Image (cartoon, rainbow, N blue to C red):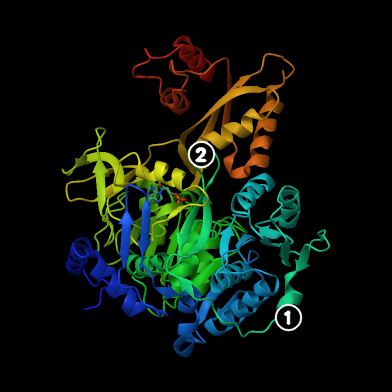
Amino acid sequence: MSYYKIENLEQYFKHYNKSVREPRKFWSKIASENFTWYQESEKIVEFDMAEAKIKWFVDAKVNIVKNCLDRHLSKRGEKTAIIFEPNNPNDAAEHISYNDLYVRVAKMANVLREQGIQKGDRVCIYLPMIPEIAVSVLACARIGAIHSVVFAGFSASAVAARINDSECKMVITSDGGFRGEKTIDLKGIIDDALTNCKSVETVLVVKRTNTSVSMKPGRDQWLQPLLDTASDNNVAEIMDAEDPLFILYTSGSTGKPKGMVHTTAGYMVYTAYSFKNVFNYEENDVFWCTADIGWITGHSYILYGPLLNGATTVMFEGIPTYPDYSRFWEIIEKHKVTQFYTAPTAIRSLAKENLEYVQKYPLKSLKVIGSVGEPINEEAWHWYNDHVGGKRCPLVDTWWQTETGGILISALAFITPTKPTYASLPLPGIQVVLMDEKRNEIEDNQVAGSLCIKFPWPGIARTIWGDHHRYKETYFSAFPGKYFTGDGALRDEVGYYRITGRVDDIIIVSGHNLGTAPIEDAINEHPAVAESAVVGFPHDVKGNALYGYVILKESGEYRDRTNLTKEINQHISDHIGPIAKLDKIQFVSGLPKTRSGKIMRRILRKIAEGDFSNFGDTTTLLNPEIVDEIKEGKL
Ligand code: WTA
């Protein structure tokens, strides 16, 4: 019996039980039967949860790109690997076959080597959603360089911080990027960033927008001429199972962003397996995930998961609202997309518009629709299910994280019965537990608790780049012996999970994780600001929006608060990026603090939500009177 594809609900339970009872056998069989290895693993897994040390497919040798490309060529060489849909709907879509992609990746891999990049070197990729981002990621993986993709919406100082943290030797960027009607000056942002980055020796520049850019002699080179003369004969690097594959930064609730490190074999096996089963992928399907490759969803389900399965994957350069609100539906129709995977925030923003935008398109090609990134509320769930899925496509609400590498809790399309707002059941291999406040495991159903996983799975991130201690503290210390997700969840009477949201100081805005601390740091950099606190409040489209409480310095120079609000948001844009701007700012004379000096965010959250009832116990506050002042200021 093969374990790779689950055929029905009964089999799901069987596989699940097998994965718990005999995890080594379960994963060893999947790994051995569905991938090509230079050398297979015998030990499969070694771990010490207390030390946060986890290894999968110990001692195996593999190259993930050989599994994504080379092994498909004999059977699927002419099959389309990537459909590139440009920002402008009048520009032709590009169909890149597995043969073409192989050649492009091989040439790029040779260019990287010629430019001195070797196994283990870090390469920062700061590109828009154009084929070169896929080619660059795969070329790095082919030669064993560690890619660190930074979302091309981050500001110069945010990119610089990420480049410096992992000491990238090279940056791959483009002259600019198209986003709806806008053109973004990516090279200019990189130039600014690199004034503070000593490790970068080379910048390769893709031509996309034909905007004029400055090229620094000795550092910057146009990519195309290098590719034109590169050979397409490239020998892939033989990688150890636990060699790092990539670093991807995610917000921490305190301090600097965390460079999550994913390693080669476990990530490969888990993304391929989860892709196949959650989306019920079949050979001639056309899969479209609307995420950006700058986020984990794009890594795992635009690139690696689909390509490992020999699938056709759609890459979209633009935005859902350009040229109008029907762009997503038009693309589904045009490319006969069978699986469509997007975020609740996109659904909510499109659901606000006239129904005709979606009703114009029959969307008959669709078989499965998916959601990721934040809890999907009941209304958005039904709109998506009714108007996009036509009530016939299973809606898979997939819960997972940058840290988990792939989907951990989700319905499996056509197998698990779905329930609105419930991510439903864990995938095989994922031993989910809910913990109570006393750190005990909750056995019952119909309960809420902190969501933890008590056994490692192949896709889990192995460390935080350069800071294993922080990795251990963040994920393995709150509930010793278990991986703590930072999310809260409910379990219903049949064991389905509903994710209720973060229980730490991370706020998810339009599906993007934002830590409150870095935003507060950016606000506090403004010369007029003495102190600040940021909380989330519910927002119709974004899920959560940001509310900032700001204490001004006493100098009184800044009387004009309209300008001040703009300036503060500009500071945030400069330090992090426009995604972290505040929707509301309230100027206050103090913040509610405990006697130990900790801000009571619970109260600030309630005020931001407009809920003035039941602030809970405020007796531990140092300054209880401030609560009334803030409340009145909000009115
Ligand atoms: C949230 C994105 C509810 C959750 C793949 C998690 C979700 C964080 C869901 C990780 C979902 C993601 N339902 N919440 N289906 N999917 N989340 O690292 O709070 O960008 O911890 O990974 O998003 O966000 P990240």
Position of residue 242 in the picture relative to residue 396 (left or right): right
Q: Left or right of 368: which side holds 138?
A: right
Q: Describe the element under mark 2 as helix, strand or loop.
A: strand
* Ligand 1 is within 8 Å of the C-beta of the residue at disc 1: no
> Looking at the image, is 428 positioned above or below residue 439?
below
For the question of whether residue 221 can be seen, the reply is yes
Q: Residue furthest top?
A: 625
Q: Is residue 355 above or below residue 45?
A: above
Q: Is residue 151 above or below residue 22?
A: above
Q: CA distance from mark 2 to mark 1?
A: 43 Å
**Which sits in the foreground, 267 or 473?**
473
Q: Residues within 10 Å of mark 1 (few under 14, many from 20)?
A: few
The answer to which of 10 and 486 lies nearer the viewer is 486
Horizontal and vertical percent position of residue 174: 71, 63
Image-quadrant location for residue 203: bottom right
Q: Is residue 546 left or right of residue 478?
A: right
Identified at 53% across, 66% down, the residue is 330
Front residue (pair 469, 262): 469
Residue 515 circle label:
2
Q: Callout 1, which amino acid?
A: Asp
In the picture, the disc for residue 228 is 1
Q: Secondary structure at mark 1?
A: helix
